[in-house]
Image: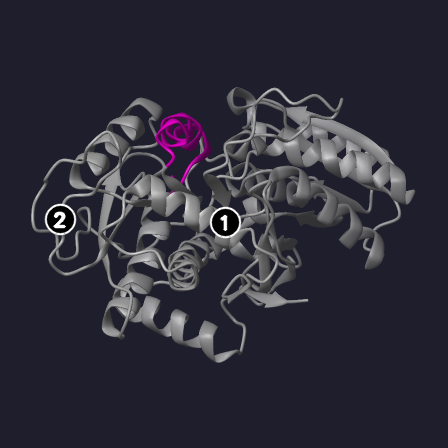
Amino acid sequence: MDFSNVSRRNFVKLVGASSVISITGLAGCSSAGTPAADASGAFKIGSIGPVTGAAAIYGNATKAGAQIAIDEVNKGNGVKFDFNYQDDENDSEKSVNAYNNLKDWGMQILVGCTTTAPTLAVTSESSSDNLFQLTPSASATDVIGGQPDVDGNVSVQRKKNVFQMCFTDPNQGTAAAKYVNDQKLGTKIAVIYNNSDPYSTGVYKKFMSEAKELGLTVVAESTFTDDSATDFSVQLNKAKSAEADLVFLPIYYQPASLILTQANQMGYAPKFFGVDGLDGLLTLEGFDKSLAEGVMLLTPFTADATDEKTKNFVKTYQEQYDGTPNQFAADAYDCVYVIKQAIEKSGVTADMSFSDICNKLVETITSSDFSFDGLTGAGMTWSDTGEVSKQPKGMVIKNGAYVGM
């Protein structure tokens, strides 16, 4: 997701300074991609995200999820990882600096970045270097490149080394429209989106396109910008006047909380439905969480799932970080295990150059016989477009908790 201007869930305790497991030094890496010698035979995994600054909650979530997976992998036999997480403060220039620091350290594979704008900057570097990159949470199509816009034009060429664990923005819009239609959630739909935000705009455009194909009735469309995200009376009155019984919010949870508050104040009570940007409503400080009751959203992960893998992850997360993991922590956790499985299947070794490792991992992850069962999906696959194929899960907020629909 594009987290350039917002912050994610507010955890009580999160990871502190950058994590480094078994790092023996900051030996350099040659331009050919040959890593510094590692006597332990561990692969050097780098990761980048904001662990300080306004967007710190994002980076702390992905950092915590990845760290739990790293610790689990290193307790077992076989593949071992050294892990180095760098803070970019959600700043593109600092993210590129962090990437170069990780290369100097000897990074061979990158889990990240976390937020979209820094990821776009870093993918330009990693693509030129041919270093394998799997992002847990940067969902813009330009992150992977090669994706046509609504007019069918491709402005950013495919970056063959870059893959996503999260849904792309257009895929979320398509899935949301199909879910609204299949579940018959509303007869008259209003949409409120942020036209200054690539994430929100990307989801909105695809939702509208799919809604038209499905014959959904959209009776009101309204926009706002980051600078005007304080008063939504005009947008809500437009939806109310059009008698919309469902309001689609392809936006982040901060402006959504204001929309819910102001709708309640004006006595307007439609159903509210969104995608993964709404994840965070229940932890937003100062928000009356009772107003989120009944809010629906699509997300790849639910912390209340009863499978053993999810229960163990949630338990570990709560013990170590005193909070409930969200989808971004889960996506980062899955990233580490996808890399582990791809390493095992490809047969790469830690003494190989990062470029040779990249070529093998790309070949492996896009092969027809590669699939992954994780926290955020079963039977996940990747095509050579870099997109992940997995099913979103419908969730509704009941009694102050996320419940699978």
Give the amino acid at mark 1. Glu
Q: Residue at x 72, y 31 (%)?
A: 205
Does residue 171 appear in this view? yes
Q: CB atoms at circles 1 and 2 under 8 Å apart? A: no
Which quadrant does the C terminus fall into?
bottom right
Label count reads 2
Callout 2: 10 Å neighbours few (<14), some, many (20+)? some
Residue annotated with mark 2? 37
Q: As rendered, which of 35 and 13 lies closer to the eye?
A: 35
Q: As rendered, which of 384 and 271 lies closer to the eye?
A: 384
Q: Is residue 187 left or right of residue 76?
A: right
Give the amino acid at mark 2. Ala
Q: As rendered, which of 130 and 227 lies closer to the eye?
A: 130
Q: Secondary structure at mark 2?
A: loop
Above or below: residue 100 compared with residue 300: above
Q: Residue 180, image x and y in percent?
A: 79, 52
Residue annotated with mark 1? 363
Q: Secondary structure at mark 1?
A: helix
- The quarter of the picture where residue 258 lies is top right
Q: Is residue 28 left or right of residue 175?
A: left
Residue stretch in magenta: 112-130
Q: Residue at x 67, y 38 (%)?
A: 170
Does residue 284 appear in this view? no
